[in-house]
Amino acid sequence: MRSHFLLATVFAATIIVAQDTAETIRTLVTNACTANKGGYFSVGAGYTQVLNTGGLLVGGQGGWMLGHRVAIGGGGYGLMSRIHAERFDKHLEANGVVARPSTLHFGYGGAFAEVLLNHRAPVHVSIPLLIGYGGCNINSPIGEDDPQADVGLLSQGFFVVQPGVHAELNVAEHVRVDVGMDYRYTSDIHLTALPTDALRGFNWMVRLKVGSF
């Protein structure tokens, strides 16, 4: 009797341990029983608006999955489009300098965390948050040391906080796709003639994730 009870206890403990270390996560292809820890890498691209002009933002992230529900790691994004710094050019014109159009560029990166809601479902919600630092500059034919005009500040660093809400699809055991919106909040920008909130705005992103979730 005691031996039967001992065997039953060991069997029940084995089931509990197995449930703690692996979960069944549904995908479009099949159900996947995955380990309790993992990691992934993602690449993404999307639309953002800077100085009332639309542009292409691209980036990537890499991190560790903890218990299927939380990810932590690092990532970064950069503006790939040429954004005309029209206000800066008007500043040059006011100083009697006429040159080719100037453009604004920026990039940023930092640490991120992501929380998954209802993560076992094929379609679920992810809430990412990135906190970091970046740099921006005005690309102009007139440099800061150019005697033709007082151009002021052409480059600087900034702090960034970027929360978001995404809908995520489990395509297969090691592949996910998400679509969502982020808001990029930066510290004040003091580049010549540009508004202090020049880099703040929404990102509409699509990301491809590959890894062990």
Image (spheres, rainbow, N blue to C red):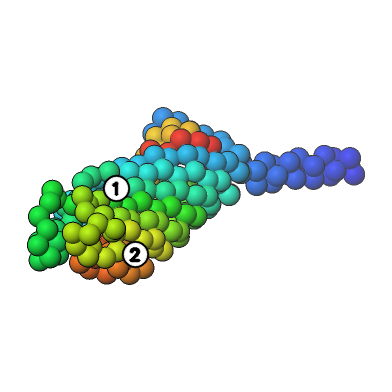
Indicate which disc residue 131 carries: none
* Residue at the image point whose x is 37% and y is 44% from the top: 59
Residue 63 is situated, as x and y percent measured from the top left of the image, at: 52, 45
**Type of residue at label 2?**
Tyr
Frontmost residue, 115 versus 19: 115
Residue 33 relative to residue 188: left or right: right
Dot 2 alpha-carbon crowd within 10 angstroms: few under 14, some 14 to 19, many 20 or more: some
- Locate residue 46: give its quadrant: top left
User: Would you name the residue on which mark 2 appears?
Assistant: 185
* Residue at the image point whose x is 29% and y is 64% from the top: 153
Looking at the rendered structure, the secondary structure element under dot 1 is strand
Residue 199 relative to residue 94: left or right: right
Dot 1 alpha-carbon crowd within 10 angstroms: few under 14, some 14 to 19, many 20 or more: many
C-alpha gap between disc 2 and disc 1: 15 Å
- Closer to the N terminus: mark 2 or mark 1? 1
Q: Is residue 178 visible?
A: no
* Residue at the image point whose x is 33% and y is 69% from the top: 188
User: Would you name the residue on which mark 1 appears?
Assistant: 79
Residue 98 is situated, as x and y percent measured from the top left of the image, at: 9, 55
* Residue at the image point whose x is 55% and y is 41% from the top: 39
> Furthest residue to the front?
147
Frontmost residue, 138 versus 83: 138
Residue 134 is situated, as x and y percent measured from the top left of the image, at: 40, 56
Q: Nearer the viewer, mark 2 or mark 1?
A: 1
